[in-house]
Image (spheres, rainbow, N blue to C red):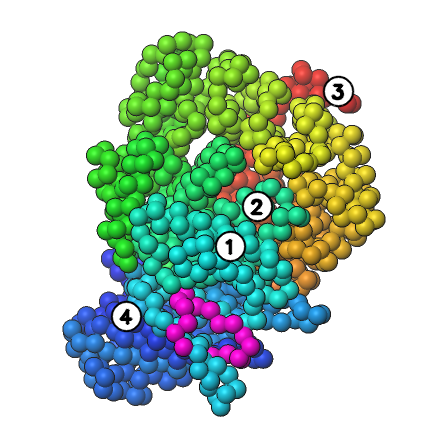
Amino acid sequence: MCISRRDGVSGSTNVQGREVLPTNVKPVHYDLTLEPNFEKFTYDGTVTIDLHVNEDTDFISLNTNELKIHDAVVSSNGTVVESKPQISTNKDAQTSTIKFPQALSAGSSAQLKLNFSGILNDNMAGFYRSSYQENGETKYIASTQMEPTDARRAFPCFDEPALKAKFTVTLVADKGMTCLSNMDVASETDVQGGAKKAVKFNTSPLMSTYLVAFIVGHLKYVETNNFRVPVRVYATPDQDIEHGRFSLELAAKTLAFYEKAFDSEFPLPKMDMVAVPDFSAGAMENWGLITYRIVDVLLDEKTAGASRKERIAETVQHELAHQWFGNLVTMDFWDGLWLNEGFATWMSWYSCNVFYPEWKVWQTYVIDNLQSALSLDSLRSSHPIEVPVKRADEINQIFDAISYSKGSSVLRMISKYLGEDVFLQGVRNYIKKHAYGNTETGDLWSALGDASGKPVQSVMDVWTKNVGFPVPKAEPIPPHWRRQARGGSSLYPVMLGLRSKEGIDENTMLTEREKEFKVPDLDFYKLNADHSAIYRTSYSPERLAKLAKAARDGLLTVEDRAGMIADSGALAASGYQKTSGLLSLLQGLDTESEFVVWNEILTRIGGLRAAWLFEDQKTKDALKSFQRALVSAKAHEVGWEFSESDGHILQQLKALMFGAAGLAEDPVVVKAAQDMFARFAAGDISAIHPNIRGSVFTIVLKNGGSKEYEVILDRFRNAPTSDEKTTALRCLGAAEDPELIKRTLDLATSGEVKNQDIYMPLGGLRNHTAGIQARWTWLKENWDEIYKRLPPSLGMLGTVVQLTTASFSTQAQLDEVDAFFKSKDTKGYDRAVSQSLDAIRAKVNWINRDREDVETWLNKNQYLQSKL
Ligand code: BES
Ligand code: ZN
């Protein structure tokens, strides 16, 4: 029997239109036993779910996906009610319904016992297999990834974040294997006549299904006792487990720090962190058992660059923040995802800044999260932070820059407005009040409101409920700012943050559509001091010139300089300003000394060059000359020798300038790269410093051919760490020879590249037109295979679609991409398609608007003739 959705029996729709389970029963406890089979790649499972019956009922509906339920027993208060119930499955709604004649009565408790089996799949979702090589042999571990809606793929469950229950997990495996779950081990017993062991874990606290995790396999670990409970890092035998030490010790310190910051003890008896060889995201915050992509947790200090270390620190601190924010207190439903991800992002930067003040991560924030947020949010296909999601296939798609970056930007803004101490006091109250429960956005605002005595909710609602951001315009004289909310009538309360010679005005809030402000000195003022607020400011060209001078005179902070460049670049691209204004601004900044500012300068030149890629060669060469003229002196000045005493930021500055000069064909840098590479190819691996490994590979591929390609391909295959392997893999696409492009594309689907890394060889092709075109042809020709390898529910198909399409910038290309996806079922990746189309469209319009403007500027400034 197939039960339709409208009769309210299975996969019903609630008042918000969400596809959720009926509320007739509620899970209280799961007793779950699983036995993976590494020969057949299947597993057998039994689950007994204790239920509270909310209303008289003769059915139980729960979530399942690609599971086979063999039999079911329904009991009530310990007595069997039905041992052969009718079981039906609704594939589309991902539910199974157990029907039985005798009704369960409201207020009673019931048990549902199910025997089932599932596939140990290779899709990195649910209970899945992950492989590694040992002595030339492929070996497997079994691991899980449940968030957002794949717990139902691992075992039958009530797979909604608000349906919290306790879990008692038992894993059955070979005696030599390590078994891990969220909790610590309660008992280990021999089963099957001593052939195997059953590892039973202690019962968890109340938790959501998406945080359940279990892992079975041959694993090694390192452990620290520097925290109240044991912390371990695990990895497969092919990895050097000593590379887990950095994350291990950082985790112990961070847990202690968070217990204080949140005034709440970490409630679990241990913290395990596992490097999983196949992993779709970067890391996953499963309570007490965090899983990671190898490169995001294992660090070889000797062969890794500064940015790799920073990424690992961020990832570890992000997932640990979730242990409270997300795991202990959980969003009510997925439209509150930003509460999880926005907060964990904010918290990881906050704690990174405490642990590594010399990294100055809040400066980086302005060119990182703030820009990702504003950039996605400027597209028509963006969405509000609080976004209604109804179906499973919509949920995966909102793990994006809005939830993470705009979400954390909103928190950064409010934390600055309230003060970080008051903000954290509100967070502590929120965690205390809602521990083991579920919340909505308003709960956070009211906790922050109570802690501060300020009207937080009314200030913040506009920011989380609307798409877009304001673009106040600073008119010349007298200065006044006009707010422009994109595509709506919503009035944003804009924290102006007016910087003048007298300091920063922290209090002025622009709440009207237009207002005049007095500034002490018309020669120097800037809005959005430190870019604490979420908006872009539009200045006239004259004002921009004054700001560039202010930058040179040391009147602006790093955040101000970087943010101003970003605003100017983005507003040129979207038509608020002329691109020539941006170019003049950048030209005046060649005395800049800071990494973060240079990074943004190069991002904006890079954006312009990428948009102009399909324009005529002369203009493209001129843009390249401009980049070279801008960066060469600085690159030569800082050099590309690295020393211990450089410090984190200087190392990154050197690496950045070296790469930028090399890619703009600075002959000295190209030669240096080729020399280093020659020594490297001859066996001296240390000839290339890890900080510039990627740049050197890219430069020599761009200026070379198959000889260089072979060496780098060999590095992908044989380098000792995942970090080095993937650096090589990311660079291969820089080779422009058609034969080599083909090899890069073939490699992507050869089986040699793990699905988790498929975007890396593809990404490398983005810098040349031949690569971009070949990549698109490859996608079209292999669509069915790619679709099968990366089912939309995984989320990676969207990434691949964006990668292979968003580099285009002509109307004809736009039409072609549009036509291709019109003929496809885009369920599960439709946001990626529309965001790509929007991004191409924006470039088409930008070029049409400013083609001449750019050419004229390049001509006037003698880059068009330049033969530098
Ligand atoms: N909860 C996410 C993992 C996740 C991502 C699950 C997408 C399902 C779909 C995790 O906390 C996370 O945000 N991981 C980030 C790392 C972080 C440093 C931003 C990731 O995977 O990139
Ligand atoms: Zn997260």
Q: CA distance from mark 4 to mark 1?
A: 35 Å
Which range of residues does the magenta coloring cover? Answer: 172-187
Q: Is mark 3 within 8 Å of ligand 1?
A: no
Do we see residue 550 in this rendering? yes
Q: Is label 3 in a helix, a strand or a loop?
A: loop
Q: Upstream in the sequence, badge 2 or badge 1?
A: 1
**What amino acid does circle 3 point to?**
Gln
Residue at image position (70%, 70%) is 135
Distance CA(mark 1)–CA(mark 3): 56 Å
Q: Is residue 774 above or below residue 755?
A: above
* Closer-to-camera residue (466/559): 559
Residue linked to disc 3: 865
Residue type for callout 2: Lys
Report whether 638 appears left or right of 228: right
Q: Amino acid at mark 4?
A: Pro
* Mark 2 lies on residue: 309
Counting residues from the start of the chain, the first of labels 4 and 3 encountered is: 4
Report the side of 347 relative to 837 (left or right). left
Q: Residue tagged by mark 4?
A: 27
First reached walking from the N terminus: tag 1 or tag 3: 1
Q: CA distance from mark 4 to mark 2?
A: 42 Å
